[in-house]
Image (cartoon, rainbow, N blue to C red):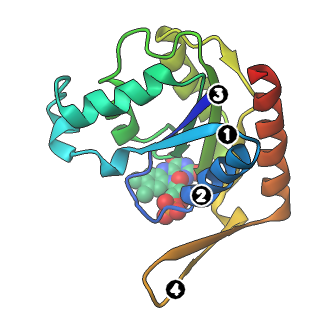
């Protein structure tokens, strides 16, 4: 069974980005793919700050990437790029950690101004680590994802129709590559 890992780089555990990654994960599961998620915000901060290659948490996350056929690289735009904490985790992957994997970039941002962050900021880093094959990227703005907190404290996210369509089309493209 093909494995897809969602690597999510938001430092905010209730980020609207989760609305997009949850949607992708559910769509992939329904299509019969095995999925796993790495949320960098859940990794020990000291491991990221001190670049602890031998941390069991980092080793476990890296194994998920190693075993994946495809990686959804998801991030909010921070300062016209992907987040620093995502880069801190990527620095802990092997030099060719993305070789042979299909990559789907998924970004959320305050505005459309930094749409090219995927091409100018993320892709050169992934290319240096062996990534060669991409599906279409999905870039949405905050207004595309409604975030609501329930009394239980849990967050639910609702995507607008355009974002749902674009994510579904990208998952379909990924599915074709994987089959
Ligand atoms: C430190 C920081 C830097 C940001 N830089 C940008 C930026 O350069 N361009 C942009 O469009 N949005 C930027 N944003 C907005 C976020 O990309 C956007 O709000 C994102 O969806 C995070 O929202 P969240 O609260 O749902 O995680 C920035 C937000 C933060 C906190």
Secondary structure at numbered mark 2: loop
Instruction: Name the residue at 83% across, 36% down.
Output: 172
Q: Tell which circle, 2 or 1, labels the residue nearer the N-terminal end.
A: 2
Tag 4 near tag 1, CB within 8 Å:
no
Q: In which quadrant of the rendered image does the C terminus lie?
A: top right
Tag 3 near tag 4, CB within 8 Å:
no
Number of residues whose C-alpha sits closer than 10 Å to that of mark 4, classed few (under 14), some (14–19) or many (20 or more): few
* In this picture, residue 108 sits left or right of residue 161: left
Secondary structure at numbered mark 4: loop
Q: Tell which circle, 1 or 3, labels the residue nearer the N-terminal end.
A: 3
Query: Residue tagged by mark 2?
Result: 110
- Label 4 and label 1: CA atoms lie apart by 32 Å
Instruction: Name the residue at 85% across, 52% down.
Output: 165
- Label 2 and label 3: CA atoms lie apart by 37 Å
- Residue 111 seen anywhere in this rendered image of the structure: no
- Label 2 and label 4: CA atoms lie apart by 24 Å
């Amino acid at each position: 069974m093909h494995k897809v890992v969602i690597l999510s780089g938001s430092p905010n555990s209730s980020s609207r980005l989760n609305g997009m990654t949850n949607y992708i994960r559910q769509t992939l599961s329904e299509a019969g793919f095995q999925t796993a998620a790495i949320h960098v915000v859940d990794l020990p901060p000291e491991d990221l700050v001190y670049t602890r290659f031998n941390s069991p948490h980092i080793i476990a996350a890296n194994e998920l990437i190693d075993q994946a056929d495809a990686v959804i690289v998801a991030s909010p735009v921070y300062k016209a790029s992907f987040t620093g904490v995502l880069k801190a985790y990527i620095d802990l992957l092997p030099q060719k950690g993305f070789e042979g994997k299909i990559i789907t970039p998924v970004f959320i941002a305050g505005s459309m101004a930094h749409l090219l962050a995927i091409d100018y900021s993320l892709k050169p880093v992934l290319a240096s680590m062996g990534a060669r094959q991409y599906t279409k990227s999905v870039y949405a703005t905050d207004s595309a994802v409604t975030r609501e907190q329930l009394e239980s404290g849990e967050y639910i996210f609702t995507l607008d129709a355009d974002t749902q369509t674009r994510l579904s089309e990208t998952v379909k493209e990924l599915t074709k590559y994987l089959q």
